Image (cartoon, coloured by chain):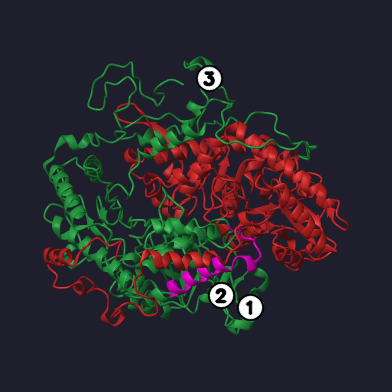
Chain colours: A red, B green
Amino acid sequence: MRYLPLTDADRRQMLERVGAGSIDELFRDVPEAARLGGPIEGLPMHAPEMAVERHLTALAAKNVPAGSVPFFLGCGAYKHHVPASVDHLIQRGEFLTAYTPYQPEIAQGTLQVLFEFQSQVARLTGCEVANASMYDGSTACWEAIGMARRITRRKKAVISSGLHPHYVAVCNTMARFTGDTLVTGTPELTAATDLEQLVGQIDGETSAVVVQYPDILGRIADLTPLAAAAHAKGALLIAVVTEPVALGLIKSPGEMGADIVVGEGQSIGVGLQFGGPYVGLFACREKHIRQMPGRIAGETVDAEGKRGFVLTLSTREQHIRREKATSNICTNSGLCALAFSIHLTLLGETGLRRLAELNHARAVQVAERLGALPGVRLVNDSLFNEFTVELPVEARPAVHRMVERNVLGGVSLGRLYPGSAALANGLVVAVTETVTDEDIDALEGALKEVVA
Amino acid sequence: MTINQSGWKPAAPVQGPGDTGTVTGNRALMLEEPLIFELDGADTTGVDFVAAPKVASRLGGLERAERIGLPGLSEPETVRHYTRLSRQNYGIDLGLFPLGSCTMKHNPRLNEKMARLPGFADVHPLQPRETVQGALEVMNELAFWLIDLTGMHGVAMSPKAGAHGELCGLLCIRAALEARGDAREVVLVPESAHGTNPATAAFCGYRVENIPATDAGRVDLEALKARLGPDVAAVMITNPNTCGLFEPQMKEISDAVHAAGGFVYCDGANFNAIVGKVRPGDLGVDAMHINLHKTFSTPHGGGGPGSGPVVLSEALSPFGPLPYTARTADGVVHLVEEEQADEFAEEHFGGKLQSFGRMTAFHGQMGMFTRALTYILSHGADGLKQVAEDAVLNANYVLRSLEDVLDAPFAHSGPCMHEALFSDKGFADGFSTLDLAKALIDEGFHPMTMYFPLVVHGAMLVEPTETESKAALDQFIAALRSVAERARAGDEALKSAPVYAPRRRLDETLAARKPIVAFRTPAPDANKVSGLNEVGGQ
């Protein structure tokens, strides 16, 4: 077995040192009745690398990779080009095979990366501080609601209907057990978001208002009035960003008054990966740092006065505080945070802006072309790289009919909001820098056919 | 760009053991590296784009007016920055990484290669099902083997890491209790448990109480039985436990908990010791998370990502989270989401599913599933059994090779499982586990887990794993023996260890007292280096 270095001679010698006659003696605490006699049933015996590779490659071939067809899916996960050097660097064994940096003297690489990541995330979101990552955007969103509860000592969160329905579902799951009240709604296919209505729903019991920016339909709204309204009632504003590339071009939520900004960092450096692993972004005002969940890297000095980095403020965390911790999170998304940070370093301010401009310009072109098709209505006035169109037919079957034409044409709102007749004809289309002119022609042609 | 902005002053007099006497602060292959914010050329970018077509902007009047303040580097600078930083890290690729309870084993590169196949890596979670059959098959196949290896009834694949898996298990338990109208408030957790156990129980609204342990480092069954009652929702047990010992009375514990109407959660962090040897399902466990990043060797990546599928008993399976995969008789693998859940359960499972809901946006850590499946198929039934046997043999070899110089509090009670536990008893006055650990760094090893479990004074938990050769173990044992002897003898030099690492001991108190957790652009007058920090700060 290629991954096991011990030889039978080693094993015999070692058993002798241990003073055991057989391996089974070492398992003597396992009740006889529960011990398995031989190799577990059902599973085949060990296999050479080539055989395993053949099996997995055959499975992979049954999927349609996003890069192989005209591709327009978004809604919380976006296809962007990731420079080759990102994946090369994250595969350096010293990054890939390191543990959580509990021994800082020999983990300065990871710790400095996390410090840089936190600094990048803080600036991008317009906040003062950020943590070293969460699992993904949806779990970060729930953690933000929990954090707002601890800060305000209130248990009612008002959630915009523009928040990704899967994020809402995650929050509903948790709220059922924690006793938080969540005020939620379903979006409408209008150019305006629900921010004005939200203002009316904030009261003296509200811990936080949660709003996605840009929202699930791709719309962008100024958060400033909402922040003011929340703050007037002593509530916090939580902004959720599922497409951080947008922040290269539009104002950051922090700039508009958000107290906590969480997000999904998948767009930058991570790739689609069928939903995971992704990287949750979590940023907030400095005054709330001690209520933040998750690991935080901080700057310090070593015994000789040299700058170095450590995990800090760990009295918030489960390994110190146990049941009084701010969260139960332990393992986070370190390697994805590294990928995010490398990609963002390669882009820099200039590259991120160009990338965002390219995404936006492409999306506007496609939105206008699709909106001009007979029977198709463009819902958005505002958009970044994603928008919603209302089709004259149900969008869900239309998506499958586009697959038959070799086009992955978008996400139907029927998939995200099953049972909502008002949204059934909605199709959310994302357009990134990876889309070519030919891809756009193919989408336009396929959509025209399936709505005809 | 000038040399050495990384914090120490090359102009300062050269003295002390850590000084290099070089103007750069570098020591040959050990290279100091500034922050990206200190390297930034302000407008530099390492990515080329085609020009954006001209369109009328539709950003709702929210165009950014201010700079963000993001540093940019060209590709060569980027590659060098991260390569240099990587060299300040210890990883399993470099040497033995005996962190107890963390299972730092070799990460096979075939797993990396498979996870990067475009058919897995470049697939969107909301793609129509007919375009992701292979991905769903991977999930379903892995789920099948996890159930097989644990002897359980079902598995929830979506939890993102171990603690998220614990949350999943406890939510299942809570949902099952609520379904029978049974509100219970308490979760019992041994003192030796991982911090995530009590944190998770509290996270989903339970009150946490401790379970006492016996002198032999096991759960005190009689004390547990005495505490069980109608208010106890669940007992969380780690088996093998965090002292590296198997709980021989696991079945009796389960039976007692079940008789009192509660459920048994097993923390599966230490499954590596028993994979292929015993099935938790045969010991009465109701829910157990499996850290794919431990037992099934998906890389730890400096702290994540993990993946924590939860295997469930028949009683808990109906309450697991959405979405889940299921293969029907026609060979099609379904992704069952909110919409079809009731219908699907009605049709295929002869009853309504009572899922507690969704716990993450999408389907879980697909990239980890691919790696774990590759790992399982590579090892096979015989290989996985050998994994557990070699892991346990290696740990016992370390235990028996060092018990004369290091106090092993439970060694009298028999063999350990996959990890050997030592204490600081016998060290000279004023010498601690920390001193020993830092001295191990100078010997070229990552230290063991320190000060955990909490039930042993100055605990040192050593988990060598099965992927260490005898030669590697012998060298580690020699190093640990040497530093243990120095700690017993009171060798003052230990106090200044590590000497040869990229940094000496770091001031953690300072970091927490005055937290600096993001780069701040220095004020212009304090910034002596021209050409830097031109970007806007906050």
Pointer 2 and pointer 1 on the same chain: yes
Residue A425, how many percent across, how many down?
80, 62
Tell me, yes or no, whether the two marked residues, 2 and 1, touch with CB atoms within 8 Å: yes
- In this picture, which residue range is highlighted in magenta? B123-147
Q: Are marks 3 and 2 in contact (CB under 8 Å)?
A: no
Q: N-terminal of the two: label 2 or label 1?
A: 2
- Residue matched to label 2: B326
Main SS of the magenta part reads helix
Image vertical order of residue B72 relative to residue A39, above or below: above
Q: Quadrant of the C terminus of chain B?
A: top right
Residue B461, x across and y down, in percent: 26, 55
User: Secondary structure beneath disc 3?
Assistant: loop
Distance CA(mark 3)–CA(mark 1)? 63 Å
Judging from the image, mark 1 belongs to the subunit labelled B
The residue depicted at 30 percent of the width and 32 percent of the height is: B29
N-terminal of the pair, mark 3 or mark 1, is 1
- Mark 2 → mark 1, Cα distance in angstroms: 10 Å
Q: Could you say whether the residue bearing mark 1 is in a helix, strand or loop? A: helix
Q: Does the magenta segment cover residue B130?
A: yes
* Residue B344's disc number: 1
Horizontal arrangement in the rendering, residue A290 relative to residue B504 (left or right) = right
- Residue A163 in the image: state x and y as whole percent: 69, 53
Residue A29, label in figure: none
Q: Nearer the viewer, mark 3 or mark 1?
A: 1
Other-residue count near label 2 (Cα within 10 Å), few / some / many at <14 / 14–19 / ≥20: many
